[in-house]
Image (cartoon, helix red, strand yellow):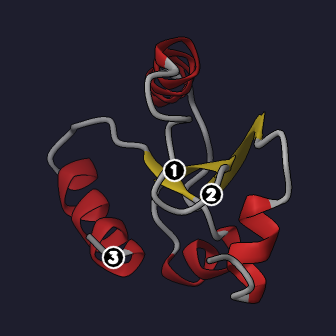
Amino acid sequence: MCQQSVGLLQRIFDDHGLATVSITQVPEITALVKPSLAAFVAHPFGLTLGAVADKNTQRAVIRRCLAESTQEHPAGTILDLGFRWPDDLRERQLRKDAP
């Protein structure tokens, strides 16, 4: 689902009292949509939660997102969760240099 659609859905859910948080890999685009709360994860596209079979990182990302959804944040907040990929695959994808 695209970041714009997620942001719009978040607003609807929030209006009905449901806590929401989306995960973004491109905070510059997410900022334009202004979702209620987004979490930036600097992982490559297609590996948002972590490497294949890396259950520890995958769970850590989800746990951080869930924890942040229970905290008070001003609308439009984009949190950097601090997760980073160990090599330059993400940067190559952004430059469109990745295979």
The quadrant in which the N terminus is found is bottom left
Q: Which mark is residue 45?
A: none
**Which tag is nearer the camera, tag 2 or tag 1?**
2
- Tell me which corner region of the image, top left, top right, bottom left or bottom right, holds residue 71: top right
Q: Identify the mark at residue 2; answer none if there is no mark.
A: 3
Residue behind mark 2: 44
User: Residue 30, relative to residue 89: is it above or below?
Assistant: below
Residue at 62% from the left image edge and 77% from the top image edge: 99
> Mark 3 or mark 2: which comes first in sequence?
3
Residue at label 1? Answer: 37
Element type where label 2 sits in the image? loop
Mark 1 or mark 3, whichever is nearer to me: 3
Picture layout, residue 79 above or below residue 62:
below
In the visual, does 7 lie left or right of 91? Answer: left
Residue type (three-letter) at the residue carrying disc 3: Cys
Could you say where residue 22 lies in the image, as x and y percent from the top left? 43, 50
* Nearer to us: label 3 or label 2: 2
